[in-house]
Amino acid sequence: MKKFLVKSFSVQLLLFFMIGSLLTSFLLSAPAKKVNINTASVAELQTLPRIGPQIAQRIVDFRSKNGKFKRIEEIMKVRGIGEKVFEVIKDKITVGSGK
């Protein structure tokens, strides 16, 4: 009986850790908050894939010179951001809340 209880407890403990691991994976894979290209700092822009310090600075400079982006596609007007980079970042950027 004692061996059965120990095995039963071991199985329950294993299941507990497996469920905890799955929950953690799910929570960590939840979609991240989008980066607002109209308000993001150079550091925030660099969190986007394929956007390094130089391109991030160009985005900020472009925004300062030309005003806010009205549509996310306008980011392709920034030197260094073409269709390939845009395809990678388009689901991770926004021009404002709810857009």
Image (spheres, helix red, strand yellow):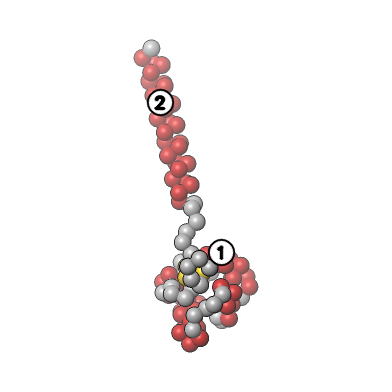
Q: Is residue 8 above or below residue 22?
A: above
Q: Is residue 13 above or below residue 73?
A: above
- Name which residue lies at 49% across and 84% down: 67
Residue 24 location in percent, x, y?
44, 45
Q: Is residue 10 above or below residue 89?
A: above
Query: Is 94 on the left-hand or right-hand side of 4?
Result: right
Secondary element at tag 2? helix
Please name whichever residue, 80 or 95, is drawn nearer the observer in this view of the structure. 95
Callout 1: few (<14), some (14-19), or many (20+) C-alpha neighbours within 10 Å? few
Looking at marks 2 and 1 on the same chain, the residue that comes earlier in the sequence is marked by 2
Picture quadrant where residue 84 is located = bottom right
Closest to the camera, between mark 2 and mark 1, is 1
- Name which residue lies at 48% across and 73% down: 37
Secondary element at tag 1? helix
Residue under label 2, please give it: 10
Labelled disc at residue 28:
none
* Residue 80 visible somewhere in the drawing: no
Labelled disc at residue 91:
1
